[in-house]
Amino acid sequence: MWRTYVLDCLLNKYTLIVAGGGLGSVLRYLVQGWGQSLTKGTFPLGTMIVNVVGCFAMGVLNMVFAERIPIRMEYRVGLTVGILGGFTTFSTFGWESFALANEGQGVRAMMNMLLTVTLGFAAVWLGFRLAQRWYGA
């Protein structure tokens, strides 16, 4: 009985993550495309909209789940890791930085933000330059 319950919970959690991730990815594609059309491609507004909306949703959901609405862990994970993770991982970055700051660890929050953005940009640059060298351009 106990093994069946654990297996059901695990399968349910992963199924919700997969389904939510697919839904979140489609939503990201639609919202990002709509936002980008507003600037005719002159500024990455679509990506910014997705990231800000995802961060806002992550804040709302985490507060509501922690303070107001008790929800089963697999549903919480399906919504946050699945849908929001498919929509934007930036929401997780925003939440983790906020959580550090909210716990009085402002220096760590700032380090997380500075390092993530700086190293992420550097990794994109390095990956682009290496691929350019490997494949010629």
Image (spheres, rainbow, N blue to C red):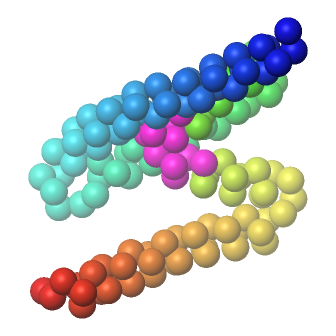
Q: Is residue 16 visible?
A: yes
User: In x, y percent, where is residue 18?
Assistant: 49, 31
Q: Nearer the viewer, residue 90 or 40?
A: 90
| Position of residue 117 in the picture relative to residue 11 (left or right) | left
**Tag count:** 0
Residue in front for this viewpoint, 10 or 72? 10
- 3 vs 53, left or right, is right
83 falls in the magenta region: yes
Asked whether residue 76 is in view, the answer is no
* Image vertical order of residue 122 relative to residue 30, above or below: below
Q: Where's residue 5, x and y in %?
A: 79, 14
Name the image quarter holding residue 100: bottom right
Residue 94 screen position, x and y as percent: 61, 52
| Quarter of the image that includes the C terminus | bottom left
* Residue drawn at the location 80% of the way across and 28% of the way down: 66
Question: Residue at 45% of width from left, 81% of height from top?
Answer: 122
Magenta stretch holds residue 122: no
Q: Is residue 11 left or right of residue 25?
A: right
Q: Along the horizontal axis of the image, is 64 left or right of 49?
A: right
Q: Residue at x 16, y 57 (%)?
A: 41
Q: Which residues are magenta?
A: 82-92
Instruction: Please tell me which residue is depicted at 59% across the width and 37% down the height of the picture.
Output: 81
